[in-house]
Image (tube, rainbow, N blue to C red):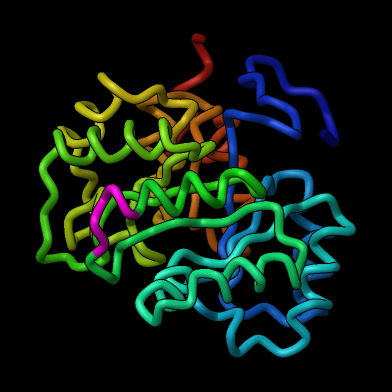
Amino acid sequence: MNYILNSIPSRTQKPRNSGFTMAMDKGLSLREVEDFIEANGDYVDIVKLGWATSYVTTKLKEKIDIYRAAGIPVYFGGTLFEAFIIRDQFEDYRRLLDKYQLSFVEVSDGSITLDHDTKCEYIQTLAKDVTVLSEVGSKDAAKIIPPYKWIDQMQKELSAGAWKVIGEAREGGTVGLFRDSGEVRQGLVEEILTQVPEERIIWEAPQKEQQVWFIKLLGTNVNLGNIAPNEIIPLETLRLGLRGDTFDFFLNK
């Protein structure tokens, strides 16, 4: 850091298993990626190329290479996985991962109906070659999944070989873990945490208020995802108690 302040919470160091920050790239240019890494690279653990944006991204290989050179893994959004699955192109998807030499993959079913045992089979197959992040929750705001089902699916997907499970929120933070107002479904989160270890979960939390809520619940080293590129440093200051929303939270700890 640039100067010394006392009573700053201790952050885990990269490569880390907790305190994980996943950024969402929704179409940055190569120059923007370079600038993003220069300003934020120390605080980003992994980058998701949002939903299926990689399909229309120009100079996709060059973009991935820039992230790789900076030591930041990249993976395709889960919606792209679903787009291949719904078209019966799973083997084509595996070849795509090989083509771009991706070591992480997201398995999700937020936009399609997929038998859960079949989803776990995809996880098991992919986990033999790459690190799997599996996403639980629907992108349909009208589809409310009860807590016991979230827990059951998370546990089974971890057992199938997922490294971490992701709690769905979309890029807007208005579905899945959250109500359409962006308010956290507190009871759902608390019940999940009674059965699933917190370090195995990445909570999608694109809105500042959601990030604050999780930091206050689980501390500075909570795993958070779907963070916009221009919100990485603001999030880091929240984690360190250096923004008004968490300013007093760590002072007496």
The residue sitting at 32% across, 54% down in the picture is 118
Q: Residue furthest right?
A: 69
Q: Is residue 44 left or right of residue 4?
A: left
The vertical placement of 36 against 27, above or below, is: above
- Report whether 137 appears left or right of 11: left
Using the image, determine if residue 226 lies above or below residue 60: above
Residue displayed at 60% across by 90% down: 56
Tell me where residue 140 sits by quadrant: bottom left
* Magenta segment boundaries in residue numbering: 114-118
Q: Position of residue 168 (x, y in %)?
A: 34, 53
Is residue 89 in the magenta section? no
At horizontal 75% and vertical 65% (from top left) the residue drawn is 36
The N terminus sits in image quarter: top right
Measured as percent of width and height from the top left, residue 123 is found at 46, 48
Query: Mainly helix, strand or loop, the magenta region?
Result: helix
Q: Residue 87, located in which quarter of the rendered image?
A: bottom left
| Residue drawn 14% across the image and 34% down it | 148
